[in-house]
Amino acid sequence: MVVTYPDGNTKEFEQGATFMDAAIGISEGFARKALAAQVDGQVVDLSSVMPGDLAVTFLTFDSDEGKSVFWHSSAHVMAAAVKRLFPQAKVTIGPAIDDGFYYDFDVETPFTEDDLAKIESEMKAVVKENAPFVREIVEKDEAVSRFKDEDEPYKVELAESIEDEEISTYTLGDFVDLCRGPHLPSAGRVKSFKLLSIAGAYWRGDENNRMLQRIYGVSFPDKKLLKAHLEWLEEVKKRDHRILGQKLDLFSVDDEIGGGLILWHPRGSMLRKVVEDYWRDEHEKRGYQLVFTPHIASERIFQTSGHLENYSENMYSPMDIDGTDYYVKPMNCPGHIKIFKTRMRSYRELPIRLCELGTVYRYERSGVLHGMLRVRGFTQDDSHIFCTPDQAPSEVVGVLNFVKDMMSTFGYEFQAYLSTRPEKSIGDDESWESATNSLKEALETTETEYILDPGEGVFYGPKIDIKLKDALGRMWQGPTIQVDFNLANRFDINYIGPDGNEHKVVMIHRVVLGSMERFIGGAIEHFAGAFPVWLSPVQAVVMPITDAHKDYAETVVEALKAKGLRAELDGRNEKINRKIRDSEEMKIPYMLVVGQKEMDNGTVAVRRRSEGDIGAFAVNEIVERIGKENSEKSL
RNA sequence: GCCGAUAUAGCUCAGCUGGCCAGAGCGUCUCACUUGUAAUGAGAGGGUCGGGGGUUCGAAUCCCUCUAUCGGCUCCA
């Protein structure tokens, strides 16, 4: 067999060699590091590597598969500890997730913070005992009756729902769990762990089911990794846009105004204005036409659009205007369609690209609101492209290139997903196929790597979803491009073709930023509040040393403002140290100190955020430098 | 909406098992200081203890309810 070791080296063994032969084969350290193995593409327990297996790769914590095995085993360790402390708790499932693991339990009284500490110390005991994970294959009926005997109704349900006749179980000490595996060789591998939080979660994610108690945790093969991870979590917390939003005076949410409704403060509004101006300029450049549509509309349009039928649970109660119900709009599409349909459209004027920073209101359940990222009123950077079927592929290419440009300006990497026809959908096969092909072609012509998401499209058409990767490697839902058959039909949106007949348009719905709220909330975290010059609400603060230098400082501010830069004077009667501290905390990119020396020479002493003093510059020199960073949108 | 937690001054937080006018730091205001690269000093002002209801001789503290927030579930731009 050929064995690949964690360090990437490979070695061939003769037929009949055992796992232990492989273990001592090359490096002594690897047996300690290996968590599981991959045989013929299947991840398996180390113990099940058999002599004669052809290609074996040992998995370590460095690989996603290795992590997954590690965390899943950690979940079992936790469940074992919980069963010891709370024998009446019913176990359910405990998978590995992207950054750790959880296990759901059914208990009469929810766990408390104190319980977490107790469970942690019991886990330590389980780890110390270092019992092996023992795999066992049993008949399905046998497993079901065993779990019945143990009074584990959830395991019974799971076992019964498995199609195969044989089921694997894993035993750790006296804790038996129904599980596909694979697992670590023994519990002792779980060297360092931390239980992070307790939360309610529905059995099988269905809110009609019983609420279970979920415990989240992370674990690592050594202390250092755990420490690094906890520090990363600290960093995430520090970057929280809700905390930075308050510190940097960007936005707030008010109890009396209502949850999920954002108050944009002057600085946050400036940030938003800069993004919006850039957005508008880029749209004009690319042949989009800016429109405005009303915030409320008669029920008649939402009947035609089907929103009242399909989307009413997300819409707010209507208001009565002269006997007709009017609704606050949850989407911008109907308005754009109505603009398109104000007159006959010739194929000669297609594509028509209408865009709007359109504010919509959607009902969101109270428990889901989250700062700026999940709100009830938000402004989408919306656009609807009306084109002929032939134009669709190139339009999608245009949008994709647009998206790439915009995202690189903000320093985001991204990952594209192509979602195809879901089970519940409208439209004929032909439309779906041609629309899906348009999207696929566009991804290929723009050389965009994508992941296929079969069946994840919207009921009215296929879509491309783009997820942004921020500075901490976290993924955010970003741009989406959707082909919409539904509205094109419902509103009967046509154009006159070269043949003089009416043809149905292809309608493409897309957002680039998503919504101003979500995008800016995400950007706050991406930049940790330290925005590049072009986005900074205040780009430079001029700080006179004493009152005697205030007038001169004022002229520096004016010089910056004259070039369209955003500058402020810190004329407070405070020491320079204090002024610098405050500006550093407000993440102002440039601090310009002026005292007697600078006044005499016509210069400023420049301090760059988080870099410190970078020396003296002539006023016009620094104006030019900041102006250049601003216009080039440097990151 | 559901499970759990939380809500005290503009901000961050003390206030134990109910008991004299509810505290601190920062910010704010006033005064002094006129300052050279991350917090000058002194003084003053500031609170319906999230809203409403209840228990009690007495409630920031206990109970109910509403609202909002936080961690999740579900959902989503």
Image (cartoon, coloured by chain):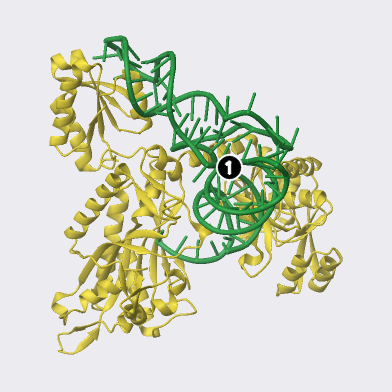
- Say which colour chain B has: green
**Going 72% across and 61% down the picture, which residue do you hit?**
A92
**Is A58 on the left or on the right of B38, as rendered?**
right
**Is A541 on the left or on the right of A86, as rendered?**
left
Pick the residue in front: B42 or A263: B42
**Going 13% across and 28% down the picture, which residue do you hit?**
A620
Image position of A616 with respect to A294: above or below: above
Residue A474, x across and y down, in percent: 46, 49
Outermost residue, right side: A149
Image position of A597 with respect to A56: above or below: above
Q: Secondary structure at mark 1?
A: loop
**Is A355 on the left or on the right of A223, as rendered?**
left
* Quarter of the image where one finds residue A40: bottom right
Residue A563, x across and y down, in percent: 14, 37
**Chain assignment, label 1:** A
* Quarter of the image where one finds residue A432: bottom left
Image position of A385 with respect to A30: above or below: below
**Is A420 on the left or on the right of A622, as rendered?**
right
Q: Quadrant of the C terminus of chain A?
A: top left
Residue A171, x across and y down, in percent: 80, 56
* Quarter of the image where one finds residue A447: bottom left
**What is the number of callouts on the image?**
1
Residue A1: tell me if it is visible. no
Amino acid at dot 1: Asp
**Going 41% across and 67% down the picture, which residue do you hit?**
A418
Residue A303, x across and y down, in percent: 36, 81
Residue A455: tell me if it is visible. yes
Image position of A31 with respect to A47: above or below: above
Neighbour class for label 1 at 10 Å: few (<14), some, many (≥20)?
few
Q: Quadrant of the N terminus of chain A?
A: bottom right
**Residue receiving disc 1:** A7
- Say which colour chain A has: yellow
